[in-house]
Amino acid sequence: MKTSAAGIAELHAEVTAAQARANLAESRADEAEARLAQMVARASSTEALIANLKLEIEKLRRQLFGTRSERTARLLDQLELELEELEAKAGEDEAAAGQAAAKTTTVRPFQRRVPSRKPFPEHLPRERVVLPAPDACGCCGSDRLRKVGEDVTETLEVIPRRWKVVQTVREKFSCRDCEKISQPPAPFHATPRGWAGPSLLAMVLFEKYGQHQPLNRQSERYAREGVELSVSTLADQVGACAFALRPLHALIAAHVLAAGRLHGDDTTVPVLAKLKTRTARAWVYVRDDRPFAGRAPPAALFHYSRDRRGEHPEAHLADYAGILQADAYDGYNRLYDAGREPGPVLPALCWAHGRRKFFELADIASRARRGKTARAISPMALEAVRRIDALFEIERTINGQSAEHRLAARREHSAPLVAGLEDWMRTERARLSRHAPVAKAMDYMLPRWDDFSRFLDDGRICLTNNAAERALRGIALGRRSWLFAGSDRGGDRAAFMYTLIVTAKMNGIDPQAWLAHILDTIADTPQNRLHDLLPWNWKTKAAPQTQAA
């Protein structure tokens, strides 16, 4: 019996020791896993921090020195996407490291160093949730407690979109003397068969033309939220809204064409055709006087056409006589005729377009990416880029100043550089064959030198046509979402709405809020007061309510 008991005790001791060793091994494995997860999280956090610093550096460089190359905008977009992915990865790894550290007592949870978050805006409503106070002291158990303060943790939350039906009741009253029925007038609706409120209409319009969400996607999303709105029903309202907004569009168009200087440009628009899509064009004419301290508010006017023939800009600018900043597209040539009525349009060509042709031959970074297959860098093209960049550097110092000050600075500093560039370019061009790539870049500018150098005679003219290209940026991005316009009529309607939305954005107001207010009030606004509804005159009524909340 003693021998048997001793054997059992010995076995029990061995099992206990084995279990202890297993627990120790498991603890060490958990600790190693936690430390590994912590290292991964720290590495991810460092990557995200580096990406964030790179993005900030590029933004600061662009702010200080302007666009340094043709690829700067693409670089910023790429850095934004890279930072987004790295931040998501860092957050995921931090959570994994915290979960792994919770299994141990020796490894502290990893916490990322993140930029300090701005406090939540004061105008947001606060919902106060007070947790139940303790009934007794956690130390001695006494119930004699008194409040000495509180800690508040703020969490940002969002309420899902809520739909509601507004019932407008018009009571009827009968006169006891004459028996005539009296009743308030029916409420105004922006569209016929007015079942949709102005805020809903503005949301549909802005999502379609401002956020590039086709009506079929909107219809599907609304159905998931419990509201069945067919595509045909939404399309009917879009057309009715375009008709209701015509007076505002006409005022914006008149404002744009009253400018002494315009930016013009166009971009491709895919349009649905029978069994295929065809390429149409979207044109834009931008009035932006801010570079020379002009007081006129900025605005953009869009047009649509089936093709890119010169007759379209001729029709768009039939009554315009001023300065047109654009590229060297031949379709504008008839506008420049001296005998044109009501007067010739003066061309001011874009130096960014001219510089781009040289830059493509002198892009060192692109050559490095392509390796052995890349074309050799042209020293002549590099010299042209250097000389043109000197002009851009002068422009950055005078941007936003008066036309008179800009003109004086250009005559003093830019004119000698332009003259030197022309002399150098004509001398070098005479030594090149007509087939040389850099000769083609020179041939783009030299025959049009007077139009390129017109900025030296007028302080209002900009060195580039970037204002028009910025206005077209939304269309270029949206093409990936809506794929094509449904018809020529749809292209015209899109140009109509782009005019309103882009103009609102240029004036720093919320296009959706502005459209909602316009659709709610335009019918009650006298014709001579319609100017009050233009984006630069409009003041949102939500501000006083927000402050009160």
Image (cartoon, grey):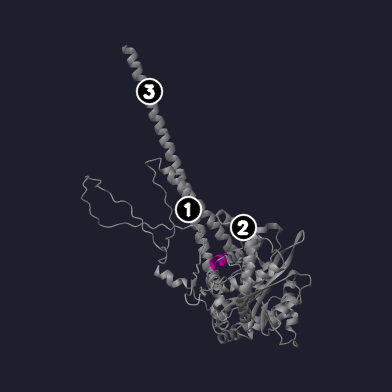
Residue 446's quadrant in the figure? bottom right
Residue on which the image places disc 1: 45
Question: Nearest the camera: 243 or 428?
Answer: 243
Q: Is residue 236 left or right of residue 108?
A: right
Helix, strand or loop for disc 3: helix
Can residue 35 be spotted in the picture? Answer: yes
First to last magenta residue range: 197-203
Question: Nearest the camera: 286 or 240?
Answer: 240
Name the residue located 67 percent from the left edge and 67 percent from the top edge: 362
Residue 379's quadrant in the figure? bottom right
Q: Is residue 234 left or right of residue 2?
A: right
Name the residue located 79 percent from the left edge and 70 percent from the top edge: 435
Residue 198's quadrant in the figure? bottom right
Location of the C terminus (image quadrant): bottom left
Residue on which the image places disc 3: 14
Location of the N terminus (image quadrant): top left
Name the residue located 33 percent from the left edge and 12 percent from the top edge: 3
Can you give x and y, in whole percent of width and height, for residue 396 in the image?
56, 77
What's the amino acid at mark 3? Glu
**C-alpha separation, residue under disc 1 versus residue under disc 2:** 37 Å
